Amino acid sequence: MMTDTNIKNNAEVKKAFQIPLADIYETEDIYSVKLEMPGISKDNLNIVVDDDELKITAESSTEENTGNLKYAEFRAKNFSRTFRIGNEVDRNRIDAKLENGILALTLHKSEAVKPKKITINQVN
Amino acid sequence: MYTYNIFNDMIKLRTVFDDFFEQKPGYESSREFPPVQINEGNDQITIKALVPGISSENIEIQLVDENIVLSGSKKEDYENQQYIRKERVFGEFKKSIKLPYRVKHDEINADLANGVLTISLTKSEDAKPKKIEIN
């Protein structure tokens, strides 16, 4: 029997995820990541560090009242973005702040990789 | 019993291509900022606009005739650092949204939460159908 998998049934319809826009800068001590995630509250935001990946996912909990929707330039607000992070990032020191639809992450670098000045011992 | 069917794989491949060329639902970047959604029902209109990172004092909402005009500015929040990535967009914006009917001027509510601006409007009495008595 041949089944056309192209006709997606409801269970198969993938949730549409948007990639949140990001601004990133690096200093000697930290990486700062700012992501635009409008409509996301603290409760439905997930930030997971898995090995060398930092994954940020957010699903809007409120079901859109699509019955009365007359016009839309955006759809359900689900976001997902994954960043690859190096060994220099301290996995235990990642700070997150959500304010006004902007998620600000601060990734601290571990002490071991920070530039260190080496003093030369004078040997006489 | 599982039988391997080569057509399934071929159709799956087609889905991959379809998904790639289909425009993903999301921001419609070609539209003017901010992206909006309009809900209508029970003589009520709700407008939602995505305005992440903009505080309420930087947004102005005006009712001009039968239009809602959103204007303001999204101020840069760059630190004095060398950026690796700059994807976010800043600047002034102005957008006019035509309403389907006249609304009550004194029953307009605007809320800003989590970077989403929600404006609630109520249909004006004189926009409702009126029965006219015949003498």
Image (spheres, coloured by chain):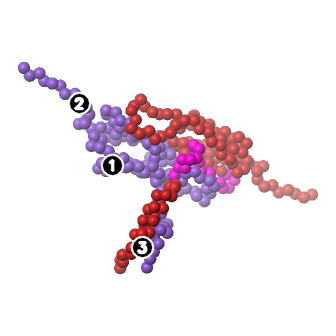
Chain colours: A purple, B red
In which quarter of the view is residue A86 placed?
top left
Amino acid type at mark 3: Phe
| Numbered circles on residues, count | 3
Looking at the image, residue B119 sits to the left or right of residue A85; the answer is right
Q: Is residue A83 above or below residue A106?
A: below
Look at the image and give the residue range highlighted in magenta: B26-44
Q: Which residue is mark 2?
A: A116
Mark 2 secondary-structure assignment: loop
Q: Which residue is mark 1?
A: A53
Looking at the image, residue A15 sits to the left or right of residue B133; the answer is left
Query: Which residue is located at x 53 percent, y 49 percent?
Result: B27
Q: CA distance from mark 3 to mark 2?
A: 60 Å
Q: Is residue B90 above or below residue A55?
A: above
Numbered circle sitting on residue B7: 3
- Horizontal and vertical percent for residue B88? 48, 40
Which of these two is toward me, B107 or A38? A38
Nearer to us of marks 3 and 2 is: 3
- Furthest toward the top, the residue is A124
Mark 3 secondary-structure assignment: helix
Query: Which residue is located at x 41 percent, y 71 percent?
Result: B8
Query: Which residue is located at x 72 percent, y 45 percent?
Result: B66
Question: Looking at the picture, do discs 3 and 2 lie on one chain?
Answer: no
Q: Quadrant of the C terminus of chain B?
A: bottom right
Question: Looking at the picture, do discs 2 and 1 lie on one chain?
Answer: yes
Numbered circle sitting on residue B53: none
- Horizontal and vertical percent for residue B50? 55, 45
